Amino acid sequence: MTCCGHCRDANDFFNTSTARSDLKRYLRRGPDKQTRLLVHSIRSSGVTDKTLLDIGGGIGAIQLELFSNGLSKSVNVDASLAYQSVSKEEVNKRGLANKTAYYYGDFTTLSSSLPHADIVTLDKVICCYPNMEKLLRLSLKKVDTIYGLVYPRVNPFTKIGFWLINFWFRIRKSEFRTYLHPPALVNEIISSHGFRQISYQKTLLWQVAVYERGNCTPGR
Ligand SMILES: C[S@@+](CC[C@H](N)C(=O)[O-])C[C@H]1O[C@@H](n2cnc3c(N)ncnc32)[C@H](O)[C@@H]1O
């Protein structure tokens, strides 16, 4: 499977109606539980005057939450045009356009032109991308302090669920797939870049891990 086909078909999956319904749900109920856990953990490390790079930010729930805690600027990179335009509309409505920047495309191809940020997040993103290692390594290079991610646990529920989702994509002749990347490898890659885990939480399907850059930065 090519990454091009994958990203092209991501646009079909993460389309305008999904984006609108995600935003509606967020406005009614706030962030999903796993995103709430991630935001809570990032908040406790201090957000005032910090910058955020949210990769695969979707409707932009993380930036909206952190702006209320004094976040100074957010950069949102997403391979879905629909998510980005819905996110921009909400940011404009809230008068936050001057604090946000949007980049459309695959982060791994855009990364060299993107700025560093104090906080980098990937909320339910590595499970939508075939080359997890590349995505992690390039994103880790962008972090000044805090790196937070939400990704699926590997358990019978996610194994069956992801198999069914991928079966559905296959039937629709879509190249888009979801992935259960091995948690030990994810943790090893992040740690090998000089990060230490400062919080770890789980829901039935997701794990929420937040790391802090240590003094020694071997992989940077
Ligand atoms: C499951 S959605 C999660 C959206 C949001 N973070 C949330 O939790 O609601 C995954 C998002 O990641 C984006 N994405 C996946 N791989 C990406 C990549 N390599 N570069 C940029 N965006 C990517 C998709 O377009 C999609 O918007």
Image: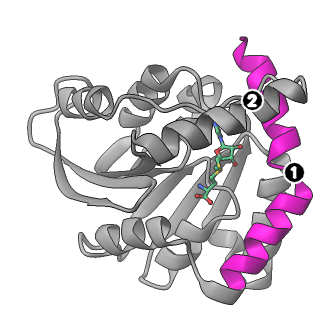
Give the Cα separation between the discs numbered 1 and 2: 19 Å
Residue 2 in the magenta stretch? The answer is yes
Rendered-image quadrant of the N terminus: top right
Tell me the crowding category of disc 1: few under 14, some 14 to 19, or many 20 or more residues within 10 angstroms, Cα based.
Answer: some
Q: Nearer the viewer, residue 217 or 205?
A: 205
Judging depth in this view, the residue of 98 and 75 nearest the camera is 75
Which quadrant contains ligand 1?
A: top right
Checking the image for residue 167, the label placed there is 2
| Residue 194, position as x, y percentages in the image | 17, 34
Q: Position of residue 13 (x, y in %)?
A: 82, 43
Q: Quadrant of residue 137?
A: top left
- Residue 89 horizontal/vertical position (percent): 83, 72
Q: Residue at x 87, y 51 (%)?
A: 15
Density class for disc 2 (Cα within 10 Å; few <14, some 14-19, many ≥20) is: few
Q: Is residue 83 above or below residue 213?
A: below
Q: Which mark is residue 15?
A: 1
Horizontal relation, residue 107 to residue 142: left or right: right
Closest to the observer, 210 or 174: 174
**Are the two marked residues, 1 and 2, in contact with CB atoms closer than 8 angstroms?**
no
Relative to 30, say whether 61 is above or below: above
In the image, 55 versus 97, the foreground residue is 55
Report whether 82 appears left or right of 137: right
Relative side of 114 to 210, left or right: right
Q: Position of residue 116 (x, y in %)?
A: 43, 44
Q: What segment carries the magenta color?
A: 1-27
Sequence-earlier tag: 1 or 2:
1
What's the amino acid at mark 2? Answer: Phe
Q: Which SS type dominates the magenta stretch?
A: helix
Mark 1: amino acid: Asn
Residue occupying the point 83% across, 31% down: 9
Asked if the stretch drawn in magenta spans residue 149, the answer is no
